[in-house]
Amino acid sequence: MPTPDPAAPSADRPPVSPVAVRRWVCCHCGGTGLTGDGATCPHCHGHGHD
Ligand SMILES: [Zn+2]
Ligand SMILES: [Zn+2]
């Protein structure tokens, strides 16, 4: 049977990195921070992510 690697990242504790912040984007604006008409996205407040 395979031995679990203690160095492997677990699903509930992903490694933290600047790139990780960009893994998910706002479901409303798709990460632009703006709505279709150019206004600040009310869901992410212009951040581009939830
Ligand atoms: Zn969203
Ligand atoms: Zn948004």
Image (tube, rainbow, N blue to C red):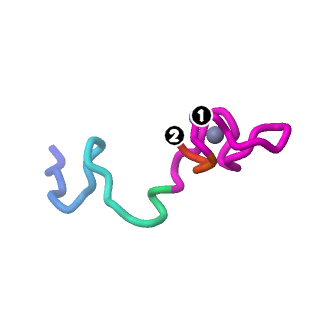
- What residue is pinned by disc 1? 43
Numbered disc 1: secondary structure: loop
With 47 as the anchor, is 37 left or right in this view? right
The residue drawn where x is 66% and y is 33% is 28
Numbered disc 2: secondary structure: loop
Quarter where residue 25 is shown: top right
Q: Position of residue 2 (x, y in %)?
A: 18, 48
The residue drawn where x is 65% and y is 47% is 31
Label 1 lies in ligand 1 vicinity (Cβ under 8 Å): yes
Quarter where residue 43 is shown: top right
Label 2 lies in ligand 1 vicinity (Cβ under 8 Å): yes
- What residue is pinned by disc 2? 50
In three-dimensional space, the C-alpha distance between marks 1 and 2, rounded to whole angstroms, equals: 7 Å
Is tag 1's residue or tag 2's residue first in the polypeptide sequence?
1
Residue 24 sits inside the magenta stretch: yes
Q: Which residues are magenta?
A: 22-45
Q: Give the numbered dot on residue 9.
A: none
With 5 as the anchor, is 25 left or right in this view? right
Hey, which residue is sitting farthest bottom in the picture? 18
Q: Position of residue 50 (x, y in %)?
A: 51, 40
Q: Position of residue 12 (x, y in %)?
A: 27, 41
Residue 29 sits inside the magenta stretch: yes
Marks 1 and 2: CB-CB under 8 Å? yes
Residue flagged by tag 1: what amino acid is it?
His
Q: The N terminus appears in which quarter of the rendering?
A: top left
The main secondary structure of the magenta stretch is loop
Q: Is residue 34 above or below residue 8?
A: above
Residue flagged by tag 2: what amino acid is it?
Asp
The residue drawn where x is 76% and y is 38% is 35
Q: Is residue 12 above or below residue 4?
A: above
Quadrant location of ligand 1?
top right
